Amino acid sequence: MEIPDMQHQVMGYDRSATMFSPDGHILQVEYAEKTVRLGTASIGIKCEDGVVIVSDKGEKDSLIISESADKIYEIDEHIMTSAAGILSDARLLVNHVRTNAQQHRVTYDSPVDVETIIREVSDIMQQYTQHPGIRPFGVSLLIGGVSEGKPKLYTSEITGNYYEYNAIAIGQNDDKIKEILRKEYRKDIKSDEAARLALKIFKDVLGDKFDINRFNVGVIKTEDKKLKKLSIEQIKNLE
């Protein structure tokens, strides 16, 4: 009779995002982190001349119009983001910070700082780990942009933490990708080289499943501070 009772207790900690388990874990948060790792991956690389995000859209139904499944979103002309996990959760966060970015322009007549955006996202995500009756966001955002003439690259975590990176990956196989990035990343890397490196890493990790048509590439250079999404022809030229 003791075993069912123990299972019942574990399920109790399991069901709430506001209850710590006896060993100090919030299980719903940890499950959400696993959800992120089920999503297709994105790689972000900070470069000497800007910032690059390469995102895997995954295998899609051939009936879907490819452009409608893009995974690189514009927050403002100088900030972009990609996501891993539940993309509908990401859409909610992206729409919120887009509004904030435009309000900042109207109020201060200047572009919003990249860190302000990641902090806003992380604050919202943290709130969803401490209120009853709601679940944590099942998504992680990779946010890149240019602020004060410098490239910036951040990721948000389910817990509400955020960090700045030189290079990072979120989603499926993120540990493998980060291991390669640690070996091959250089601080003087240019944006074209960074995009090629990310595609090469995806090719190594995905193997036979690699298909150039399932990738998005976004670039923001420090010289013009404007997001440029590469066309499929431009992406193919990077191979």
Image: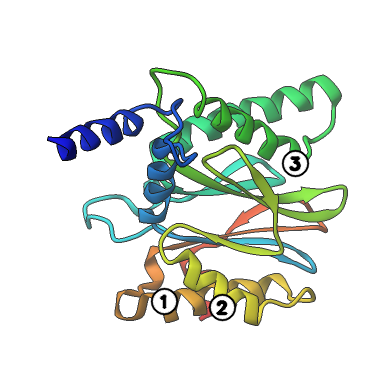
Residue type at mark 1: give it.
Answer: Val
How far across and down, in percent of the image, does residue 91 sit?
Answer: 46, 35
Label 1 to label 3, Cα distance in Å?
30 Å
Residue type at mark 2: give it.
Answer: Ile
Contact check, label 1 and label 3, Cβ < 8 Å: no
- Labels 2 and 1: the sequence-earlier one: 2
Residue type at mark 3: give it.
Answer: Glu
Q: Secondary structure at mark 3?
A: helix
Left or right for 82, reference 106 = left
Contact check, label 2 and label 3, Cβ < 8 Å: no
Q: Identify the colour scheme used.
A: rainbow
The image shows residue 58, relative to residue 9, as above or below, that is below
- Residue under label 1: 205
When asked about the image quadrant of residue 179, the answer is: bottom right
- Residue under label 3: 115
Q: Nearer the viewer, residue 44 or 36?
A: 36
- Labels 1 and 3: the sequence-earlier one: 3
How far across and down, in percent of the image, does residue 230 sit?
Answer: 55, 62
Q: Residue at x 69, y 50 (%)?
A: 163
Question: Pointer 1: residues within 10 angstroms few (<14), some, or many (20+)?
Answer: some
- Residue under label 2: 180
Question: Pointer 3: residues within 10 angstroms few (<14), some, or many (20+)?
Answer: some
Q: Secondary structure at mark 1?
A: helix
- Labels 2 and 3: the sequence-earlier one: 3
Q: Residue at x 65, y 45 (%)?
A: 162
Q: Secondary structure at mark 2?
A: helix
